[in-house]
Amino acid sequence: MHVGVQRKQEVVEQVAGDAPSATWTFDVATKVGPDGAIDFAGPFVHGKRGERFLYLSWGDGSGDAFTMFRRAKLMFGDIPPELVAPDAALTATVTLTDKRGGPLCARVRPPAIAWRAG
């Protein structure tokens, strides 16, 4: 079992599910919309305006043999507003296992995720 970040339809930077930790680094573009709200864009960003998110995808195998069976959504709307700014660097710390010890899935909410600047 592996987990990776989803770029468009492809799951990249896959890490073994039993690894002690996993780190993914990638850019997400920000822009100010006509309503003054910051919007997010880029190949790692999914969802429609106002509901954007990142996917962490779980699957059997790795590389080209990866077969996804579960995904976790990291919602941009859950980022504390004071951290959201154009050109800001953000870090999310995510607990990757659920209460039963299985792969975390669905919408990830605090305390399973914590956003911070830097």
Image: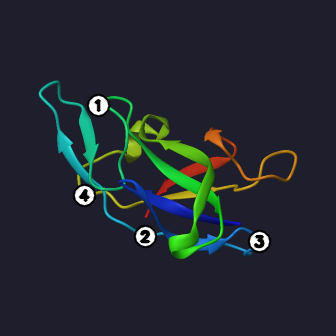
In the rendered view, would you say 116 is above or below 33?
Answer: below
Q: Camera-side residue: 23 or 111?
A: 23
The answer to whether the residue labelled 4 contacts the one labelled 2, judged by CB atoms less than 8 Å apart, is no
**Label of residue 49 in the image:** 1
Residue at the (39%, 31%) spot, across then down: 51
Q: Classify mark 4: helix, strand or loop.
A: loop
Between discs 1 and 2, the one toward the N terminus: 2
Left or right, residue 103 beside residue 93: right
Q: Classify mark 2: helix, strand or loop.
A: loop
Distance in Å between CA atoms under marks 1 and 3: 34 Å
Q: Camera-side residue: 33 or 98?
A: 98
Left or right, residue 27 beside residue 80: left
Look at mark 2 in the image and give the residue it sits on.
Answer: 25
Q: Is residue 22 visible?
A: no
Distance in Å between CA atoms under marks 4 and 1: 19 Å
Between discs 1 and 3, the one toward the N terminus: 3
Q: Classify mark 3: helix, strand or loop.
A: loop
Q: Give the percent coordinates (x, y) of residue 44.
A: 36, 55
Look at mark 3 in the image and give the residue it sits on.
Answer: 18
The answer to whether the residue labelled 4 contacts the one labelled 1, judged by CB atoms less than 8 Å apart, is no
Total label count? 4
**For the residue carrying disc 4, how many other residues have a C-alpha within 10 Å: few (<14), some (14-19), or many (20+)?**
few
Between discs 4 and 3, the one toward the N terminus: 3
Between discs 4 and 1, the one toward the N terminus: 1
Distance in Å between CA atoms under marks 4 and 3: 33 Å
Residue at the (30%, 56%) spot, across then down: 43
Q: Amino acid at mark 3?
A: Asp
**For the residue carrying disc 3, how many other residues have a C-alpha within 10 Å: few (<14), some (14-19), or many (20+)?**
few
Q: Amino acid at mark 2?
A: Thr
Colour basis? rainbow
In the rendered view, would you say 104 is above or below 21?
Answer: above
Q: Residue furthest right?
A: 100
